[in-house]
Image (cartoon, helix red, strand yellow):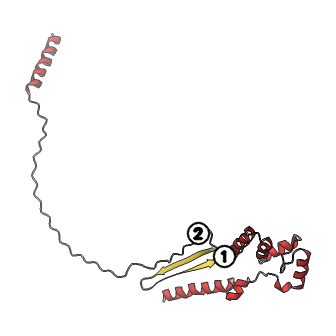
Amino acid sequence: MRLVLLLATFVAFSATAEDEALDDTIRTDSTTNSTVTTRSDTSTTLRAPPASAITPTINTSNSDLCTFGVAGAVQTQILGISMGSQITDSNCERLKLSKTLYDMGMKVAAVSTLCQDERVFDAMLMAGTPCPFEGLIGEEAKAAWKVNEELEPSVDETTEEKEKGLGDGTKTAMGSAGVVSLLLLLIL
């Protein structure tokens, strides 16, 4: 009996489920009333111009140059300053000149060019092969250098820098003074 009752309940619910119409539409009813009021007063004030000091470019991208560039710029709200300079490496130039002379077959001239550096001069003397002196080589050059010691290269300044009147110390002092002056000018 229970089985018949269970079966009848199952058939009754199945028939009821089939009678209802299947509707996939979802309906939502809603009503909204809103009021938005916005009031705005906006003003923009530019108090300082944007920074505009631009560092000058110094192109030294060619690998055959013995120079490099140094540049910088400073900008405040009132004043902008930029500057740049080019520095030449005299030892690099000496090496390039010596290599060119050697490649042209002028070996004594190439060694003489290198001997303008005190380190090379001393190394050649210590090795027993003194630097050439006015075309003399070997023992004759050694004797000529002993007689003319004042012509030996020295560490303090090269001939080129003596001609310009600007040694490394002078250049450093001038650069430092320029930076300090610039900073004082910008602070005041």
Picture coordinates of residue 115 (x, y %)? 79, 76
Q: Quadrant of residue 47?
A: bottom left
Secondary structure under badge 2? loop
1 vs 2, front mark: 2
Q: Nearer the viewer, residue 149 or 36?
A: 149
Q: Quadrant of residue 135?
A: bottom right
Q: Are circles 1 and 2 on residues that touch, CB within 8 Å? A: no
Q: Residue furthest top?
A: 1
| Left or right for 63, reference 78 | right
| Left or right for 75, reference 127 | left
Secondary structure under badge 1? loop
The residue type indicated by label 2 comes to Asn
Q: Residue at x 12, y 63 (%)?
A: 35
Crowd rating for badge 1 (residues with CA inside 10 Å; few <14, some 14–19, many 20+): few
Q: Residue at x 86, y 85 (%)?
A: 148
Picture coordinates of residue 16 (x, y %)? 9, 24
Residue identifier under label 1 = 89
Sequence-first tag of 1 and 2: 2
| Left or right for 58, reference 52 | right
Picture coordinates of residue 133 (x, y %)? 84, 79
The residue type indicated by label 1 comes to Asp
Relative to 106, residue 34 above or below: above
Q: Quadrant of residue 2?
A: top left
| Left or right for 172, reference 6 | right
* Figure label count: 2
Q: Residue at x 62, y 78 (%)?
A: 87
Picture coordinates of residue 158 (x, y %)? 73, 82
Residue identifier under label 2 = 62
Q: Which mark is residue 23?
A: none
Q: Nearer the viewer, residue 132 or 21?
A: 132
Kindly report the distance in space between the C-alpha atoms of the residues bearing marks 1 and 2. Answer: 14 Å
Relative to 68, residue 34 above or below: above
